[in-house]
């Protein structure tokens, strides 16, 4: 395929283009993940952990496998569930599955990102830089504004 043909094919997905031998490679969805509405919950000074939330949509079946932040040496992917009447958090060692095209929302009371022993206070009006790592998609850096939203519930 000439460069000219390839450019035309990307511009307009015509039947003729789809029939080209390279079409299978050229038009396969690439592994990307879209992130919307990132935010972190403000935490009191000296808090041992802070929660961050966001919405992920993967182009192909993928998985959120880890998260890092400059704010701490360590961050984890957690889930929260009711255990004997108490909300408890648990680390998801395998991360979170991101089925192709499905919107996966990390939110208070459910899956979330947890910054362990933040080096600075996570205070409202600041922001937290997070690097999300996926099984297939390239890593994404996200800047999450910090919002003051209710007290943190649940224990580890
Ligand atoms: Cu947690």
Image: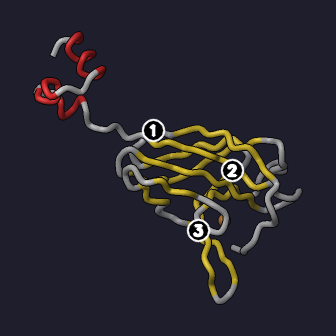
The residue at which mark 2 appears reads as 73
- Identify the image quadrant of residue 52: bottom right
Mark 3 crowd level (few <14, some 14–19, many ≥20, 10 Å Cα):
many
Percent position of residue 148, x then y: 82, 54
* Snapshot colouring: secondary structure
Q: Give the residue displayed 75% in from the left and 41% down from the top.
A: 127
Mark 1 crowd level (few <14, some 14–19, many ≥20, 10 Å Cα):
few
On-image quarter of the N terminus: top left
- The first of marks 2 and 3 along the sequence is 2
Asked if residue 61 lies left or right of residue 93, the reply is left
Percent position of residue 39, x then y: 69, 49
Is residue 156 at all visible to an observer of this figure?
yes
Mark pair 2, 1: CA separation: 21 Å
Mark 2 crowd level (few <14, some 14–19, many ≥20, 10 Å Cα):
few
The residue at which mark 1 appears reads as 138
Marks 2 and 3: which is nearer the front?
A: 3
- The first of marks 3 and 1 along the sequence is 3
Helix, strand or loop status at disc 3: strand
Q: In which quadrant of this rendering is ligand 1 seen?
A: bottom right
Mark pair 2, 3: CA separation: 20 Å
Mark pair 3, 1: CA separation: 23 Å
- The first of marks 2 and 1 along the sequence is 2
Judging depth in this view, the residue of 88 and 8 nearest the camera is 8
Asked if residue 63 lies left or right of residue 28, the reply is right
The residue at which mark 3 appears reads as 79
Q: Give the residue displayed 43% in from the left and 47% down from the top.
A: 58
Percent position of residue 23, x then y: 18, 30
């Amino acid at each position: 395929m000439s460069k000219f043909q390839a450019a035309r094919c990307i511009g307009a997905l015509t039947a003729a283009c789809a029939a080209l031998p390279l079409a299978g490679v050229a038009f396969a969805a690439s592994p990307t993940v879209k992130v919307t509405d990132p935010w972190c919950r403000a935490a009191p000074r000296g808090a041992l952990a802070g929660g961050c939330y966001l919405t992920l949509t993967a182009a192909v079946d993928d998985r959120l496998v880890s998260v890092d932040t400059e704010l701490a040496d360590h961050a984890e992917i957690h889930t929260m569930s009711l255990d004997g009447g108490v909300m408890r958090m648990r680390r998801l060692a395998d991360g979170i599955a991101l089925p192709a095209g499905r919107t996966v929302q990390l939110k208070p009371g459910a899956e979330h990102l947890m910054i362990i022993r933040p080096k600075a206070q996570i205070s409202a009006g600041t922001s937290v830089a997070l690097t999300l790592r996926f099984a297939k998609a390239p890593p994404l850096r996200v800047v999450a504004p910090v919002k003051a939203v209710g007290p943190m519930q649940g224990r580890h």
